[in-house]
Amino acid sequence: MAESLGLGGASSNPNVARIAIEQRKKKNDVVEPQVISEELLIEGVEEPVRPDGEPWEPIDFPAVTSLRLSFQNIIEIANLNNFDSLTTLRLDNNIIDSIANLKLLKQLTWLDLSFNNIRDIEGLSELNNLLDLSLYHNQIEEIKGLDGCPKLNILSLGHNNIKELKQIDYLRKFQNLRCLCLDGNKVCQNESYKQHVFAYLPTLKYLDYMLIDKKAVAQAQEGYGNMDELTEVREREQAEQAKLKARKEKEAIIENLKGAFLDCTEDLFEEMFAKEIEPENVTVLTCYPQLKEDYRDHLAESIKTLRAWMEERNEGRVKKANAFEKAVAAAEKESEEEAFQMVRDFRSHKKKVLAQIDREDNAGLKPEMEAMIQQLLDQLSGLENHLMANEIQLQESIYEAISDFEARISEIVKQMSEKGAEFFRQVEELEKVFYTGLMEGANSEVEAFAQNQDLATTDDTNKAKYLGNKEEMIQACVNFYEGHTGLIVNKEDYMSNQMTGWRNSFFERHREKQYHRNRKRVMDIKKVVDDCRAEITAASEVGEEYDENDGGGDMTYGR
């Protein structure tokens, strides 16, 4: 049973276009084309609503979530830069001819641009949260420009100039698309229109306001006339998905290797023999394929050995670093808890002492009470000294621990760096063997070619071209060797810089953290002591009864 659905600026009423146009004609208060002014913006705010129902003035742009600028004869989209929270924007029934200046509306979920003069779908690349888009009754000929709206759920393109079924294929990439309106376009007159939509957009729920029959979708999937073309599309999509999966897996491998300073070894051989490095001259040499294969095998074995050693050492490095950070955090927590307890004990004692102070009418404090106040102040000074001494001791012990751990880590990094250097010396040796073999083979084959001119008539024109020029061949081999050695040096520098960079940043970060922690702790101690001293002094000066329910303020120390 068919069901209808109101879709992005249109409705199931077949007279919707006529009604909207008549309403537009009746709007006689706007004659000249307008730009979006502050006055229009103030009048257009729909949400949030003011308690008194009046327009927002001045308008709080960042707080606005819904804006309606319909039937205003607006000629272009502009002046919307500060609407950081805007989720709904209605610009329907204007004379806008291009979509622009929307890139800052990151939170937009509903955009209505129906009944305008728009020819191209553009300017939507930053609207990643857009769910509902209406471009109903414009002049659009091609479905495109929606790649930046992957969450698109409802799309209304009714009454435009879309003619070809092929245009619909673009929408296959939008897996969340459930409602599509193309009613009123010439493409709908094609007898295969619905079958094509059902075949190419199988996840669609509504088409042209009507609920789609699941049986019709199943039939289209099985028996659509352009099945060969649809199969090709599916295969192409599967290939693209496979590539995407492979790329993500590769990125995960690289990220994992980077943690062990080994990412420079991934695809090392492929980089060394990339087209921009490998000269075409050497590819005609009969000795080259075997030399290249031997290089690949030996390099792969060296990389395997390096990774096994480095990953084991790196695992130890990571465990030690984590253990160090846990130990520092535990020392900080223990010191902080001890300090909190000392402050709580003092406050409890202070509360009891101040509660005992017995004043007589205008007679001031009794001598024994003055002695208690002074003793309390002395105890407060002792608390301050103790807290400061504990903080200094903690700071010194942590800095000492950082220095000791840095020495240990530096030794591990040194060993890893030396192992890396050893690996690159091996690669350099492999390169020398490869280069020597290449030069010997090149000289031999070039000389053989010179002595046997019959080869000059061979169909292999490249071979004749490169073997016939000894100087060019030798220079190509030299350039190849220099390209390899330069790449090896760069890779070694990269690995070394990774290691030293991690070590330096790790300890700089911890020293910086301790510096700021210490500054905050000292300030907290000072505040607690000053608050307690002020309270004690006030109790000794004010002739009112001490309020024993006063706890002396909140304890912010260390938090």
Image (tube, rainbow, N blue to C red):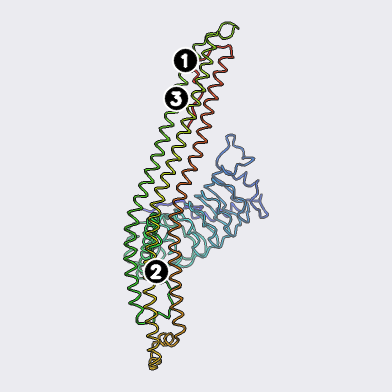
Label 3 CA crowd tier, 10 Å (few <14, some 14–19, many 20+): some
Q: Which residue is mark 3?
A: 342
Residue 302 visible at all: yes
What is the secondary structure assignment of the residue under circle 3? helix
**Position of residue 327 measured from the top left corner of the image (x, y, whole percent):** 38, 39
Distance, label 3 to label 2, CA atoms, is 64 Å
Amino acid found under the numbered disc labelled 2: Glu
Q: Nearer the viewer, residue 388 or 141?
A: 388
Picture quadrant of residue 49: top right
Tell us which disc is closer to us: 1 or 2. 2
Instruction: Tell me which label, 1 or 3, sits earlier in the chain.
Output: 3
Q: Residue under label 1, please give it.
A: 352
**Nearest to N terminus: mark 3 or mark 2:** 3
Q: Residue drawn at (48%, 33%), measured in percent from left and top?
A: 392
Which three-letter amino acid code belongs to the residue tagged 3? Met
Query: Which of the two labelled residues, at mark 1 and mark 2, occupies the earlier sequence position?
Result: 1
Q: Residue at x 56, y 56 (%)?
A: 115
In this view, the mark in front (3 or 2): 2
Q: x%, y% of residue 335?
A: 43, 32
Instruction: Indicate whether 506 appears above or below 215.
Output: above
Residue type for callout 1: Lys
Q: Nearer the viewer, residue 521 or 110?
A: 521
Closest to the camera, between mark 1 and mark 3, is 3
Q: Residues within 10 Å of mark 2 (few under 14, many from 20)?
A: some
Where does label 2 land, which residue? 428
Q: CA distance from mark 1 to mark 3?
A: 16 Å
- Numbered disc 1: secondary structure: helix
Q: Nearer the viewer, residue 532 or 80?
A: 532
Question: Disc 1 to disc 2, how far (Cα)?
Answer: 80 Å
Between residue 84 and residue 332, name the one nearer to us: 332
Residue 358 located left or right of residue 415: right
